[in-house]
Amino acid sequence: MKIMLYLLGIDTKLALAEVKSVMETFSKDCKLIENNGQSAVFEAEKPTLEKMGKRLALTHSIHEFIGKCPFNETGKFLEGIDIDIEMPFRVRIHYTETKPKIRAEELEKEYAGYFWDMSEKRGIKPSVDLKNPKTSIDFFIEEQTVYIGKKIYEIDKKQFRKTEPGNRPFRRPITMSSRTARVMVNFAKVKSGKVIDPFCGTGAILIEAGIVGLKPYGMDIKEDLIKGTKQNLEHFGIKGDLRIGDSRRLEYIFPVNYFDGIVTDLPYGISASMGKVEQSRLYQEAFSSMERVLKPDCLAVIAVPCEINLKTNMKLLGIHKEQMSTNLVRHIHIYRKVV
C-alpha cells in the first residue's frame, strides 16, 4: 500500500533518512515514491506501520495515501474519489512552508462537505467529531500542491519530552537530545538484539535503545558517568549492562562479533571521556576495537563534529549532518561491517 509520512520541519533531510532506516529495519519491500518538503510517500506493508510509528523521532504522523493534486483543483479531485470513512470523521489542514491564503478552518469546512456527501450517497449517516474522530482526513499543502491522506498512526511526542536531558536525574551541561539519540539508534537498523555505546556519557543513546526494546550496553572510562548512567536507566525502568573501561579495548571485555549494532557520539574538545588521549588516536583505536566486537553485516553509527577518515575494513554507507548550533554540526557516519 502507499503510505504518506508527515515529517518534522526542523530537518526534513534527516527525518527522511530516519524513515528509510526504520522502514528497512522492519520491511525490505519498501520504496520511496515521492518526497516534497515535509511530505514523503512510500510503498510499504501495512503490518509494519505501528512498529515504525513506535520508533520514529522526526515524524509527526503516518497516513494511508489518498492522492495529490494542484491546490486549485482540490475540489475536482475530491469529487472523483471514493474511500471508506468510519464515523465520526474530521478534516485537518496543514500548511507547511506555504503562508496560508485561506484560513484553515474555511478549507476544513469546505473539504469536509465532499466527504459528507460521499457518505450520504453510500447510505451512511455522516457525523463529525473534531477531538476524537475514528477517521481523520489530513490535507498537507506544500506550495501549490496538496497531499491527502487518511491518518493511520500519530507519533507520541510526549515520550521525547519525558526523556529530554532536563528530565534525567543525572545530566551534564552538554548532552545529546532524546530525539537525536533515537534517530541514531534507528540508523543502526537493529530490530532486536544488543547495542553498545562505548562512550555512553550520561546514557542518552542507551535510554532510547532500551525504550524501543533493544538490549543496551554502555561503557565509559569515568566511574561517575557509569554511576550516573545507571541512575538514568533505572529512572526510566531500563535494564542495561554497564562497564567501566577503555573503549579502545572492547574485545578484551566482550566476545568478538558480539553486538548487533554500535551507536555512539565520540568525545571531542575538552572531554572527560578522552582520558588525556590525543583525539585522532583515540578515534582510530576505539573504532578498530568497535569493528572487532560488531557482528558481520551489522552497522556502526558514529557521531563526530566533523567528517572523519579512519583506517577500517568497514564500508562507509553515508554521512548525515545535524545542525547543533550556528558553529557546530554533528556528522553522523554510518558504517557496515563487511562479511
Image: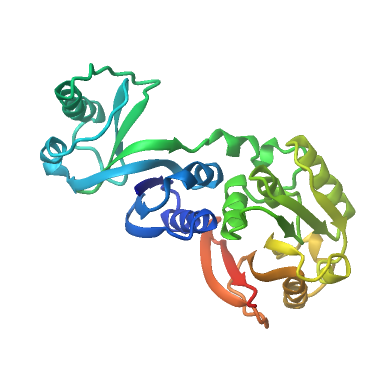
Q: Is residue 129 left or right of residue 213?
A: left
Above-or-below relation of 70 to 131? below
- Residue 312 placement (x, y as % from top left): 67, 81
**Residue 69 percent location from the top left of the image:** 18, 47
Q: Nearer the viewer, residue 229 or 39?
A: 39
- Relative to residue 319, is residue 82 drawn left or right? left
Q: Nearer the viewer, residue 326 or 124?
A: 124
| Residue located at (68% from left, 83% from top) | 311
Image coordinates of residue 339 in percent, x first then y, are 65, 78
Residue 146 visible in the picture: no
Above or below, comparing residue 120 to residue 174 in the picture: above
Which image quadrant for residue 325? bottom right
Q: Nearer the viewer, residue 158 or 295?
A: 295
Determine which quarter of the picture holds residue 113: top left
**Residue found at x 36% / y 47%:** 3
Residue at point 42% right, 45% down? 46
Identify which residue is drawn at 52% across, 36% down: 157
Q: Image check: 158 left or right of 211?
A: left
- For residue 17, above or below residue 237: below
